[in-house]
Amino acid sequence: MAATRLRIFISSVQKEFARQRHDLKAFLLGDAVLRRFVAEVFLFEELPASDRSADEVYLDEVARSDIYLGIFGNDYGFEDTQGLSPTEREFDQAARCGIPRLVYVWGMDDKLRTPNMQKLVRKAGDVLIRRRVDDINALTSEVYASLVDHLDRAGALRVPPFDTAACDGATVKSLSRSRIDWFLDTARRERGFPLKLATSTQALLTHLNLLAAAKPTNAAMLLFGDNPQRYHRTAEIKCVHCHSVEYRRPFASQQIYTGTLFEQADQARDFVLAKINRAVGVRATSNQAPASYELPPDAIGEAIVNALAHRDYHSNASVEIRLFADRLEVWNPGALPGTLTLADLRSPHPSVPNNPLLAESLYLARYIEKAGSGTERMIELCRETGLPEPTFELRAGSFIVTLWRDWLTDDTLADLGLNERQLRAVVYVRQHRSLTNSVYQAEFDAAKRTASRDLDDLVGKGILEKIGTTGKGVHYRLGKGAAKGPMGPKVP
């Protein structure tokens, strides 16, 4: 085996784990660390048509692999004339060939498994250590830890991945028991976490793969450390509130938040919510009046936590929150995984976290949701609020999420010199999301030339954005402000 170029065979019932198989492959080939060592990931369903029998193909592929990775769920799968499924035959073939086998049992209730799958789970448990998982976050976290351990024992890792490496100079006593107690209580309540409230620190860290040679890992320190910044100085969030649409001193206010990742996420979210506009409703159904923020609080939290979970902690930069008059920017040191593009973030895509162990604990405390859904959720929340869709970009060594505020305040509109038709058009687009030239003519009693002139003026001032070039498909929606210029907001 070439220790640093692995060929991994993924074995499971294809129909039961169709999505998980492809997500896992994307993770293995896209992770910043693992992609240096994983040469190929085999999925049977991706093979072209062939005149060879299926069982001959998959058994040959197992024999050619360096790692067998089995996902055992509830279904046993198709049984051949001897009563054996491809999954069990692949497991046995890996044993005959002396190939390391990594087995992950999906789900916690063994009673839901078919009788033959129960037997296969017991069979695997008799000869190797299995790990139980119940979602894709847990699976990628466990696979990540197992492969890092395999590579380390093979001597392939000179420098371990950040979140799995032992925190230099730290011991278990460097962790806060009160923060661990909070996590246990939260994870049990939010995700049905199986460990009890009285679980020892050592047992929790072992369960979450947060120990390296009996020492807490960097991930453990950032999640539960008594003073995480003593060991990782730039693991903090810098929050800046700007007076205008430009990053320019003097700032309206600024704050640096430290502590654990959970605390940083809460403090940074509160910083933004305290600075943006909030409308208070009527006490119709309770003693507390409802509040509506100009930016969706959940979208703000999602952007912040994603930055903390996915950032490059080897970078000397920190996560930055920049609140402008027209937008909120969240700067995350690092880049997208190699298998994802900016366009992929706007549609269903696999989760490829740079720091899977951090992501797993953030998920258990419900600070992030299901894998790969964060950017889509931000888009959905902004749409529901009637705001422009978020912008995702790579700039200056960082991945940046921009949430656009409803910058068209009464004062701003008054300064822009709009006529009565244009002011009514802004209200119309806020309510209906878009506007066409013909609707403008009908709604505001304007000639076609007048409508075109008014709309061009609104586009030039950044109030509206023109979608399309010619024909009936051309329409207008709320823009993001002219002050940012063609290349985006100015940065230092």
Image: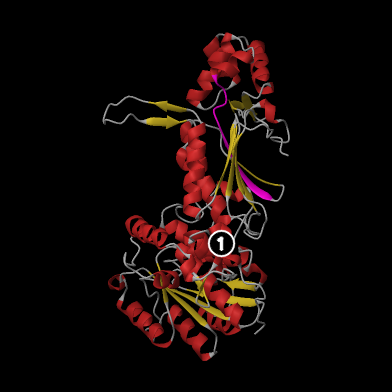
Identify which residue, 319 or 87, lies in the foreground: 319
Secondary element under disc 1, as helix, strand or loop, is loop
Residue 28's quadrant in the figure? bottom right
Whether residue 436 is visible here, answered yes or no, is yes
Question: Is 52 situated left or right of 17 in this image?
Answer: right
- Identify the residue position indicated by label 1 in the image: 355
Question: Is 357 situated left or right of 401 in this image?
Answer: left
Residue, x 63% and y 59% (percent of image)? 339
410 vs 129: above or below: above
* The residue stretch that appears in magenta: 398-409
250 vs 304: above or below: above
Identify which residue, 91 or 148, lies in the foreground: 148
Residue, x 45% and y 55% (percent of image)? 370
Q: Amino acid at mark 1?
A: Asn
Residue 206 picture location, percent across and down: 44, 73
Identify which residue, 158 or 440, lies in the foreground: 158
Whether residue 23 is visible here, answered yes or no, is no
Residue 348 picture location, percent across and down: 52, 51
Residue, x 41% and y 79% (percent of image)? 85
